[in-house]
Amino acid sequence: MPNSKVNAVVIGSGAGGGVVAKELADAGLSVVLLERGPAYGAGHFSHDELHCACDMGRPRAYGPVPPEAHPRTFRTSDREPARVVYPGWDAEYAALTASVGGATIAYGGAAWRYMIQDFHMRSTYGSDNPAFAGSNVEDWPLDYEELEPYYEKAEYGLGVAGLAGADPQAAPRNKPYPLPPLPINAQGEMIAAAGKRLGWTPFPPPFAILTEPYQGRKACVQCSWCLGFVCEVGAKSGTAVTVIPRALQTGHCELRANASVTHISTDGRGRVAGVWYLDYRDPRRPAVRQDCDLLVVAAGAIETPRLLLNSRSRLFPNGLANSSDQVGRNAMTHIYAGAYGLFEREIPHEKGPGPSIAFNDWNHPRDGSIVGGGYMYNFYVTTPLYFAGNRPPGAPSWGKAHKDFQRRYFNRWIHMDSCSQDLPFGRNRIDLDPAVKDAWGVPAARITHAFSEADNRVAEAVMDREEQLLKEAGASQVWRYKNPPGGIGDHQNGACRMGNDPQSSVVNKHCQSHDVDNLFLADTSVFVTCAGLNPSLTAQALAYRTAEYIAKQWKGGAFRSGA
Amino acid sequence: MEWARRRFLQTVTALLGARGGASQTALAPGCKVFTPHQARTVEAIAAQIVPKDDAPGALEAGVLYYIDAGLAGDLRRHRRKYLDGLRLLDHTSRRRYGKNFADLPGDRQTELLRALETGGGLGAGFFELVRLHTIEGFYGHPRYGGNKNYVSWKMLGFKG
């Protein structure tokens, strides 16, 4: 039996979808928020990294599970066969979650505004810059100034902790952060002092983690289990504990969990008419139809293009919203370019989440030595298992020597991590695997991704600086992360880029499809370039802006069927 | 989700049983996958990877049970690699030293594992798998059967 038609359907309840659902419900539209996974709350918290941490070779705590039901395929180029990969078992799968709140239930919470240059990579460095050879680097169709008020909405709507004015590279802001930054730990003090001696500027990085009670939620208790975990006190400002409950309180929004959308239907005029979804828990249950006046897809930078490509029809033979053939192209990620330092003095093992000092000096550095770059910070609290997997080159990986190393250095190391830029290339893409289907019979996403030489050069330059910092802090030995040849991680973005030209982009600056006027995207898939900073706050700022645009058009009479 | 999980587990279990898993033989006490001989061999490898000294090692921490329970559940896709790998290890051990791996003196076991680790191919893949799972079982959360009584966390002074 079909459900009665609603004004708006939002697919995906993560960073962007949760925001749009709440904003549209506030504006009085009737909204159905469809989430493929179930709800996981603080009751699903455990001090168990084998269960919760990312890609431990086990099924994922917050889905998608079971792995066998959710295959994708991966390859680094179209000259090689793609191999089947599964969530949790294979890092190349690039799993987020399948859960109410999407990845924001368990993410690390970094909440950055992008820098002014991040919206203008092409004009900042020049379209003829050799670093961009072969890439599709473009400027975004909007700039930082247009997005600034929406960054503020996101920071205040969710609860972001940070210190305004502390990062000299940051773009100007109208208001301070709503909450003071996380406390600085012993690692942070060591690298802050070392960075100052090098002439760099240390500052506490912004986090969507409450440092004081905010809007009825409790503050962070500084446990050791943050990145990958649902917060045990609900202090992590994900959408499941912020905007989604508020959306439901309006009385205009219905949340339907376990609803895996498989197809978007269009009417005879090429506009979205509704969606079909199946049950995440049981593929045998019948498909359900939900009609709507307008649709917002916020399923993440892999599932969003997959859904559009799977929504082929007579009017849209290459997939929905894909007249440009750009759906799925320019898929991007970050290189987590990190360095590790061993010290001969004890560094007290302190409470979490861990990251307390960042440097942005090597993100669009003023000396022009790096094209792009990335910020760096001291990583989350080290656990025994995580440490056991990190050894300098040549160090024994088993036996008594490994155990002795574990005992000697567990409390004597610092891990610096970063998000280093990945440039957009048409060859790095999401499309449909011709053979592999999921348990619901829907063609699986095929990921084709390799890092370019330019990406690797930038990452090496960032790691040079991390090693320099660790040595200055007194490290007796340093080594660095080894980047795989390709693969899109949890910072997946791009793949449905925004732009002014319908021939070379999927959506316009309002994240509205060029081809289908009642179809919008509200996730990182619309990013044009990926910046050297975590993506979620920018996705949320865009979602606030898109929702405002939709609500305004709606009030003017747009999108209603027959209008 | 539950339906899909059950269905897949049934399929996987049926496949493994049919292809000569441990289902026809008596299992080692407390194990769901390993026979007594397989269990003894896995314990011997694990004890090489994290040996006992003044602190407990992988054997004392119950890593065998972490691996065994894993192969019956979350680590199910590696089950075949273990059963084949254990056979390969004993075969190599008998050819070189005339005894099964678990019956070799400790330094011979170290020698053989080092040869396996650096020899490439299936043997190296098997060793890396057991090495990884032993480290996981020893340093991970005790709920899966390893790191009994939090021995590794206590050894490192990690409070959790």
Image: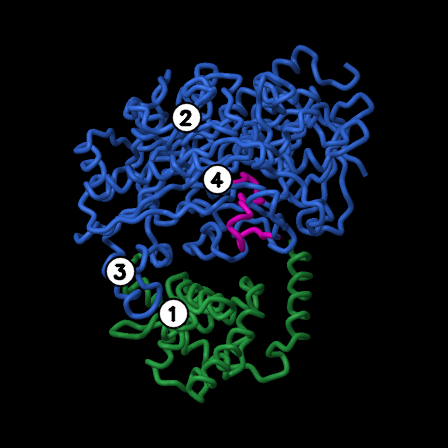
Chain colours: A blue, B green
* Label placed on residue A451: 4
Label 2 packing within 10 angstroms: few (<14), some (14-19), many (20+): many
Q: Nearer the viewer, mark 2 or mark 1?
A: 2
Q: Nearer the viewer, mark 3 or mark 4?
A: 4
Q: Nearer the viewer, mark 2 or mark 3?
A: 2
As helix, strand or loop, the secondary structure at mark 4 comes to: loop
Label 3 packing within 10 angstroms: few (<14), some (14-19), many (20+): some
Q: Determine whether A27 is above or below A46 in the image.
A: above
Tell if the residue under mark 2 belongs to the same chain as the one under mark 1: no
* Label placed on residue A113: 2
The reply to whether the magenta stretch includes residue A37 is: no
Judging by the rendered image, the residue that carries numbered circle 1 is B148
Q: Which residues are magenta?
A: A84-103
Label 1 packing within 10 angstroms: few (<14), some (14-19), many (20+): many
Distance Cα–Cα, label 4 vs label 1:
42 Å
Residue type, mark 4 in image:
Phe
Distance Cα–Cα, label 2 vs label 3:
38 Å
* Label placed on residue B157: 3
Q: Residue at x 63, y 20 (%)?
A: A28
